[in-house]
Image: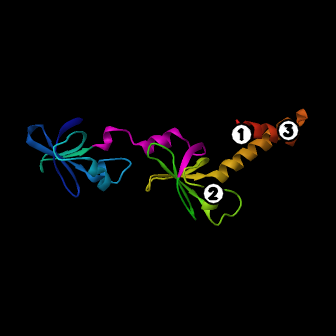
Amino acid sequence: DRVSGKIKSITDFGIFIGLDGGIDGLVHLSDISWNMPGEEAVRHYKKGQEVEAVVLAVDPERERISLGIKQLDKDPFSNFVADHPKGSVVRGRIASVDSKGAMVDLGHGIEGTLRASELTRDRIEDARSVLKEGEEIEAKFIGVDRKNRTITLSVKAKDMAEEAEVLQDYSRKSSTGATLGDIFKEQMGAQEE
């Protein structure tokens, strides 16, 4: 059920909302936002502000109602995982890079991790030598870290899959007389478009 009310107070552990019938509901910090830590998300609210929330639990003995604001929307992380099966190629922008790898902004508050060892087949000492902040990349979705709510990415796996596809294409076309050079030209032309 959805309810609305005015914020009565904001504490270290959540937001108290005054509901009809003189009852207070509590939105715990962890139930404010899907994408922001509670301590950060709570700063977007003020005493007296009218808010809408979802009833999560009712404890009649203690006269407590647990509410959630983030539950008004679907979890963007779960949506991303549902919409992008493992092994699919995703696009993102490099948000930050250090020697060990990069954080990739996949949109809608979803972050991907790209380790230096997943950039190319070659050994890379420092990811900053290959990636720049703000750069757009394509990578294969190879895993999910539900605890940290991040997607594990690999450019190396994407490139290897594309190479395997080209070789498969070549073996099919080799009976037609096409050369490996023709196929690579065709592939390079497709990438430039």
Q: Secondary structure at mark 1?
A: helix
Residue holding disc 3: 182
- Residue at 59% over, 55% down: 132
How packed mark 2 is, by other alpha carbons closer than 10 Å (few <14, some 14-19, many 20 or more), is many
The stretch in magenta equals 69-94
Residue holding disc 1: 191
Q: Secondary structure at mark 3?
A: helix
Residue holding disc 2: 118
Point out the tag, 2 or 1, that comes first from the N-terminus.
Answer: 2
Tell me the quadrant of the picture where the C terminus can be found.
top right
Does residue 159 sit above or below 173 in this rendering? below
User: Mark 2 and mark 3: span between their CA atoms?
Assistant: 29 Å
In the current view of this chain or complex, which residue is farthest to the top?
176
**Mark in front: 2 vs 3:** 3
* Front position in the image: 139 or 191: 191
Q: Report if residue 74 lies within the magenta region.
A: yes
User: Mark 3 and mark 1: span between their CA atoms?
Assistant: 14 Å
